Image: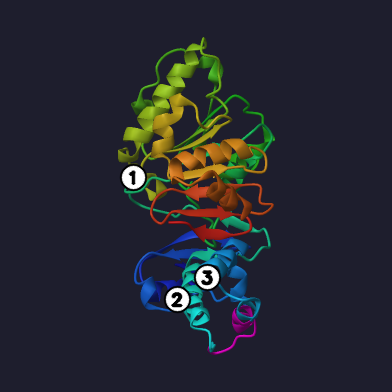
Amino acid sequence: MLALDKKLAKRIGEHFQIAVEAGKPIFAITSNYLKCRPCIMPDRPDKLLRREDWMQFIKKYRLSNSDVKKLRSTWLLGAPSFASENPRAMFAFKEIEELLLKRMRSNYNPGQGNILPWFALADNNNSPDNVFIVGNTSCGKTRWLADMLINVDKKGENWATNRPIVCFSMHPDDPSLAPARKLHKRRWLDIDMSKISAKIPLDAVEPGALVIFDDCLEMGRSDPRRLVLYDLLNELVVRGRHRRGKKGNARRGNEVAVITHYGSNRSLQITRMACKFWCLFPSCSRNQSVHMLRSRLHYTKKQTEALLDRCGDSRFALFRHHVPQMIISSNHIEIIK
């Protein structure tokens, strides 16, 4: 269940932060949430019902126009109860109410376009926050990663605070990551790609480091550096989380942030499976987003399209593939499984 108040979330059960909205945290509650009322009460609960929901209920319960109008006005006007002489309408009301309660717990849709995901601070390696960022050229992949690296809480901390950052980039002069380099300063290490000539052992990466692969995996197959980087990437996502540092966020182990143009690349199969987060850009690469999500979420094409449509005009759509599975865009948050 979603919540906007940390004290309320703590009182209900286990929780963790998943996003920020204009500097205010948003939490996901993972226990005891079915025993209490939803934490986020919308002004218009009827807006949580979609067109396809109404069509389903009308067809299932053979509702008349007057029944539909009366049902809609119940939540629109805030009526305390619903009464009808039509038994089918009463059954429909009960089912719709259960659906509304479920969506109140799993949906947050302010529609203001200022939601930014948050990777929880952790001091263990139980659940690494590996990020897989996929999109076309100039869709904002690197800029989105920079926002994640510079967005901090009231203490001035985020998931990259107090840990080494290693960056493999074909364009080290790209201004997109300049704010992140400035914030993390001496802990940021840019690798000179021209000097990579042999296999890079896992031990060469400092324990607890965050490793960024920025558009460096699309090199030609004849380039020997390509296999070197893929070997290192696979080692990091498979064994890296056990290589823990000694202080702060470094104790969570090695994590990776991979930026690529082609997310379905067969060479990235291990990385896709190891990444908790996929950040897609459906407004720029719609077909690729649909193709990748259908294989991961086991949704039909129509369901996947509807899921992306609910992001509205958000540039990004972040999918969390660990339980609870959810989608976060700049306009909304939705727990999907």
Are discs 3 and 2 less than 8 Å apart at CB?
no
Which span is picked out in magenta? 70-81
Looking at the image, is 46 positioned above or below residue 208? below
Marks 3 and 1, how far apart at CA: 33 Å
Residue 77 located within the stretch drawn in magenta: yes
Question: What residue is disc 1 on?
Answer: 246
Question: What residue is disc 3 on?
Answer: 4
- Residue 182 location, x and y as percent? 61, 42
* Tag 3: amino acid: Leu
| Front position among marks 3 and 1 | 3
Number of marks drawn:
3
SS class, disc 1: loop
Looking at the figure, which quarter contains the C terminus? bottom left
Marks 3 and 1, the one that precedes in the sequence: 3
Looking at the image, is 268 positioned above or below residue 328? above
- Residue 94 location, x and y as percent? 47, 78
| Front position among marks 2 and 1 | 2
Looking at the figure, which quarter contains the N terminus? bottom left
* Tag 2: amino acid: Leu
In this view, the residue in front, 82 or 208, is: 82
Q: Is residue 277 visible?
A: yes
Question: What residue is disc 2 on?
Answer: 8
Q: Residue at x 36, y 48 (%)?
A: 127
Marks 2 and 1, the one that precedes in the sequence: 2
SS class, disc 3: loop
In this view, the residue in front, 70 or 86, is: 86
